[in-house]
Amino acid sequence: MADVDAIMSCYDIARQYMRASDNHSQWINGYPSRELVAEDITEGVSYVGVDDDNDMVMAFAFIIGDDPTYSVIEGGHWLNERPYGTIHRLGSTGKHKGILRQCVDFCMSHIANIRLDTHADNAIMLNAVEKLGFIRCGTIYCMDGSPRVAFQKSIQQC
């Protein structure tokens, strides 16, 4: 809980970067909220990455288990139905490159089947996940009904 302010700062920087990259529709209205970050911490699914100077460079939630918003996918299908982990709310301070790769490497070290989603306006993330070998699987819908492009990466795809 001592890291909440630093995590929120990381998310603020990421939100500003989204706006500067013409992504004006993702992470609006204060998302992710301080309450959601605190909930992630309490549930043990909040992670941060630090650099060699011990400065926070990324924050994200990593949840192993079924994600209810992934139970229905349109315009495609998941690569498999094996147990998976989901990366949510990845934000970076922008101080270092390769943050997504570091996040994915960490998550794949815990489970070899990862799903994630992003907004269709997040061109940078869409490009980055495909470069890392994620496969575009279709469209999922968040709890508020908004669509997201869904991806999966799995060591064994069958």
Image: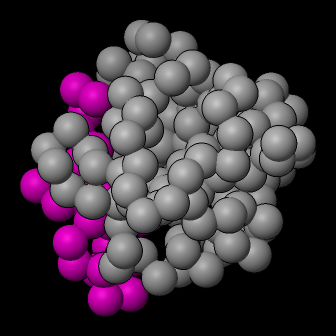
Residue 24 drawn above or below residue 119: below
- Residue at 45% over, 28% down: 67
Please give the name of the residue rendered at 82% of the width and 47% of the height, measured from the top-left corner: 157
- Above or below 81: residue 31: below
Up-down relation of residue 38 to residue 7 (above or below): above
Answer whether residue 34 is magenta in the image. Answer: yes
- Picture coordinates of residue 139 (x, y %)? 39, 59
**Residue 83 horizontal/vertical position (percent):** 68, 23
Q: Of 109 and 5, which appears nearest the observer?
A: 109
Residue 46 among those drawn in magenta: no
Q: Is residue 118 visible?
A: no
Q: Where is residue 28, by image quadrant?
A: bottom left
Q: Position of residue 99 (x, y in %)?
A: 69, 60
| Residues in magenta, as a range | 12-36
Q: Residue at x 82, y 35 (%)?
A: 112
15 or 72, which is in the foreground? Answer: 72
- Which of the image's four quarters has the N terminus? top left
Q: Nearer the viewer, residue 43 or 131?
A: 131
Q: Position of residue 82 (x, y in %)?
A: 71, 27
Relative horizontal placement of residue 54, taking residue 74 as reference (left or right): right
Rendering quarter of residue 7: top left
Classify the position of the C terminus by image quarter.
Answer: top right
Residue 88 in view (yes/no) = yes
The residue closer to the viewer here, 87 or 97, is 87
Identify the residue shown where x is 61% and y is 80%. 127
Numbered marks: total? 0
